[in-house]
Image (cartoon, rainbow, N blue to C red):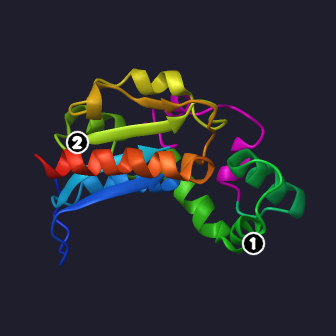
Amino acid sequence: MRRQKCSVSSDLGEVVVVGWSLGGHIALEMASQFSGIKGLLISGAPPVSRHNIPEGFMQMPHMRLVGQQYLGPSEIDAFGEAIFGAPIPVAFRRAIERADGLARKTIFEAARSGVGIDQRWLVENCSVPLAVVNGSEDPFIKLDYLEVPKYANLWQGRCHRLPGLKHAPFWEARTFLTSFLDDFIDDVAAL
């Protein structure tokens, strides 16, 4: 697979990109195409390639819902509870109901077929500072996998596990994660 940096025309200057779950994978894709990224913080998004997806993700019943086009009421509840805990905040349940199922299905089928950058290769070769922050009880990702890549520029030299938090640490511990993000941005800005 030939890898090259693509240029994306943009009025943006330098940015720090924060991506959670699918957004973390999108942030990694952005890093392969936009040279204005000065830092990446990802959460709930193990950097995988199509060849090692099972190494990065738990094989739990709720995982099949991630790429499923249609979700019934009980599936919405199961998916939402896996992400946010029970009971699901009403606004989040409505957001899951409104989410475009075809987009969800298409994105995950594309990832499984190898569309996009090999994200593990990217984190092992990209000089952009990368913060990897996850809840220690995340029910979707295999935290031990995050120790496998030989990161080119891992912030503070380690992946961070936030004690007692699950897949949505920004929701579960807002002030702590905000402080963590502030520290990362300060460090990136100083470079």
The residue drawn where x is 20% and y is 73% is: 12
Q: Position of residue 181 (x, y in %)?
A: 37, 49
Instruction: Let me know if residue 35 appears in the view.
Output: yes
Quick one: 139 or 63, which is closer to the camera? 139
Q: What residue would you read off at disc 2?
A: 129
Q: Earlier in the sequence, mark 1 or mark 2?
A: 1
Name the side, left or right, on which 70 lies relative to 120. right
Q: Is residue 128 above or below residue 162?
A: below
Main SS type for the magenta part? loop
Viewport quadrant of the N terminus? top left
> At numbered mark 1, what does the secondary structure look like: helix, strand or loop?
helix
> At numbered mark 2, what does the secondary structure look like: helix, strand or loop?
loop
Quick one: 109 or 119, which is closer to the camera? 119
Instruction: Let me know if residue 114 appears in the view.
Output: no
Name the side, left or right, on which 86 lies relative to 151. right
Q: Position of residue 111 (x, y in %)?
A: 48, 49
The residue drawn where x is 76% and y is 62% is: 89
Label 1, label 2: how many angstroms apart (C-alpha)? 35 Å
Name the side, left or right, on which 25 lies relative to 185. right
Residues drawn in magenta: 44-68
Q: What's the amino acid at mark 1?
A: Arg
Structural crowding at the residue carrying mark 2, measured as other residues with C-alpha within 10 Å and reported as few (<14), some (14–19) or many (≥20):
many
Q: Is residue 65 magenta?
A: yes
Query: Residue 97's quadrant in the figure?
Result: bottom right
Q: What's the amino acid at mark 2?
A: Pro
Q: Is residue 144 above or below residue 191?
A: above
Q: What residue would you read off at disc 1?
A: 94
